[in-house]
Image: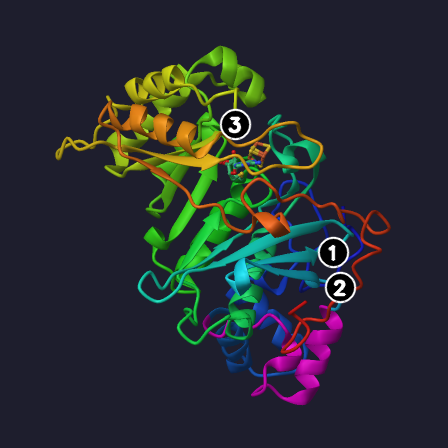
Amino acid sequence: MNTSRGTAGIPAVNGGEEVKRSLYDLDPGQLEALVAEAGEPPYRARQLAHWLDDRRQPDPRRMSDLPGSLRARLADRFAGAGLTLERHQAGDGGWTHKLLFRLPGGDAVESVLLLYPAGRARATVCISTQAGCAMGCTFCATGQFGFTRQLSAGEVVEQVARVSTMLPELRPRPDAPDHLTNVVFMGMGEPFANPAATWGAAWRLHRGFGLSARAITISTVGLVPGIRRAATEPLPVNLAVSIHAADDGLRDKLVPVNRSWPIAELLAAVRDYVAATRRRVSFEYALMAGVNDGVEQADRLGRLLAPLRVPGSGGHAAHVNLIPYNPTPGIDLAPPSKGAVRRFRDAVAATGVPVSVRANRGVGIDAACGQLRTGAGRPGRGAAGHPPTPPGENGARR
Ligand code: SAH
Ligand code: SF4
């Protein structure tokens, strides 16, 4: 943990309190204290907040309407805080981008930008909430890597800011969207195992960055206390639950946390969530050949989820998202054939539950969901082949 930073602006790590590691971890009062310390009037703090939230610019050196002395002071003060872009990979003809950010303390996380052409005109960023993950799902690259540390709320928000400011230069064609439209908490880590940062970031993205709650999706492996909290949060973000199996025997093997919160308890929490929020929930199901792709699993899944209904309208509250498994080095699993995917989809649909197959994106650059891992996780470990790429106009494309 980074305990060395003890300045007023970035309090050192301290038990219980939220950790501050990015300019985005400072609230308006702390921004004011920061500029006051530099002998600047309070309106400078509002200018700073404008850069951070409206312009999504975390780099003080680029805050052009601040006095040069303040910019230099902030840059110096926050040198080593926040995220350092270390690697950028483009895939799918420039429609998918994977970014590796180094964190203070040496760990790293990945964020993925998914662009969709005009018509759909979506630009979704997939962000990480933890370096690694402690949940140990047997099919997941991040899970196999293990957990190294929590991100602060500011570090989660800063991923969105960094991708936002890079987006104009990453667009492969003029008809690609020029601003972020969606944020999904589906990168590295389990968001509900880091609830302070997850909810802190979700609120900042909504209030500060102006994203509607419906443009934000949080994906959980099924931590019941987290789902229960989501039911009471006044921010109506979308919830995705990674289910992957329709019986406890199989789910125990794929998702070890199922032993703590088995399927019945998980679905009871989702039922209460739907009753409280009247919102639909998506269920993620990574299809693995010969493991969980049989039509009997599909039928069982459909029958488990079909009773989930939105109060009032009576419409289905569950939507199943099938993700053909993204092959992962070191893990002996493969996606089913197209025919098997279709048969699975049709068997779910036969129960009446809405179901779709998610397009595989970023496979060539290991940027698809669940392929995120910090192979370059620690300094000196695997990072050598990838010299640091400076953030900025031309540093990004490789
Ligand atoms: N920890 C959270 C969010 C991050 S994982 C969660 O588990 O929901 C994002 C999604 O990718 C999850 O649904 C996860 O199960 C899925 N996933 C992980 N590895 C995968 C792989 N190799 N192929 C396809 N999906 C995968
Ligand atoms: Fe963690 Fe999600 Fe991977 Fe499971 S699937 S190990 S919860 S990131």
Q: Within 8 Å: ligand 1 and the Cβ of disc 3?
A: yes
How many other residues sit within 10 Å of disc 3, few (<14), some (14-19) or many (≥20)?
Answer: many
Name above or below for residue 7 compared with residue 214: below
Measuring 57% from the left and 30% from the top, which residue is drawn there?
334
* Image position of 152 (left or right of 343): right
Q: Quadrant of residue 395?
A: bottom right
CA gap, disc 3 to disc 1? 36 Å
Q: Secondary structure at mark 3?
A: loop
Amino acid type, callout 2: Gly
Give, as a three-letter code, the residue at label 3: Met
Q: Position of residue 362 (x, y in %)?
A: 55, 51
Q: Quadrant of the C terminus?
A: bottom right
Q: Amino acid at mark 1?
A: Pro
The tag on residue 288 is 3
Crowding at mark 1 (Cα within 10 Å: few <14, some 14-19, many 20+): some
Q: Is mark 1 within 8 Å of ligand 2?
A: no
- Residue at label 2? 80
Labels 3, 2: front one:
3
Q: Which residues are magenta?
A: 54-78
Q: Which color scheme does this rendered protein use?
A: rainbow
Q: Is residue 157 above or below residue 338?
A: below
Asked whether residue 76 is drawn in magenta, I would say yes
Splitting the image into four quadrants, where does ligand 2 fall? top right
Q: Nearer the viewer, residue 72 or 279?
A: 279
